[in-house]
Image: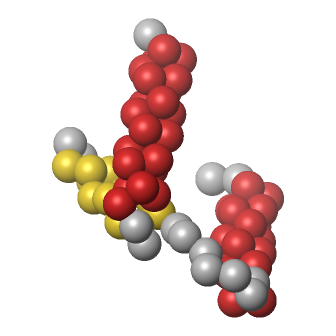
Amino acid sequence: MNPFKIMVGVVLIFLGISMLIISQSNVEYGGVVVIGPIPIVFSSSPEMAMFSIVIAAIFLLIAYAFMR
């Protein structure tokens, strides 16, 4: 594990949460957590849930292409 990459990840998460807190408008969020073969989708709206699923599928295809 590269400590620099971990630090960059923590800083990006902190910046994202900070931007959500200081924003004045209605913010939508969503994400996908994959535990084994089971995806867990969370979001603030159905549209963001669908968007998160599509982005997760794209990332899955990219990862599969690089693993071959």
The chosen color scheme is: secondary structure
* Left or right of residue 51, residue 20 in this image: right
Q: Nearer the viewer, residue 27 or 37?
A: 27
Note whether 29 is above or below 41 in the view shown: below
Q: Residue at x 63, y 53 (%)?
A: 1
* Left or right of residue 55, residue 42 in this image: left
- The residue sitting at the top extreme is 68
Disc tally is 0
* Left or right of residue 17, residue 64 in this image: left
Q: Give how far across and how far down residue 33 sits, in percent.
A: 37, 57
Q: Give how far across and how far down residue 11 sits, in percent.
A: 77, 72
Q: Based on the displayed image, in which of its 4 quarters is residue 14 positioned?
A: bottom right
Q: Residue at x 48, y 30 (%)?
A: 58
Note whether 18 is above or below 37 in the view shown: below
Q: Residue at x 45, y 50 (%)?
A: 52
Note whether 1 is above or below 13 in the view shown: above
Q: Nearer the viewer, residue 32 or 52?
A: 52
Quarter of the figure that contains the C terminus: top left
Q: Residue at x 48, y 15 (%)?
A: 65
Q: Give how far across and how far down residue 47 sits, in percent.
A: 42, 55
Q: Based on the displayed image, in which of its 4 quarters is residue 42 positioned?
A: bottom left
Do we see residue 60 in this rendering?
Answer: yes
Do we see residue 3 in this rendering?
Answer: no
Note whether 26 is above or below 32 in the view shown: below
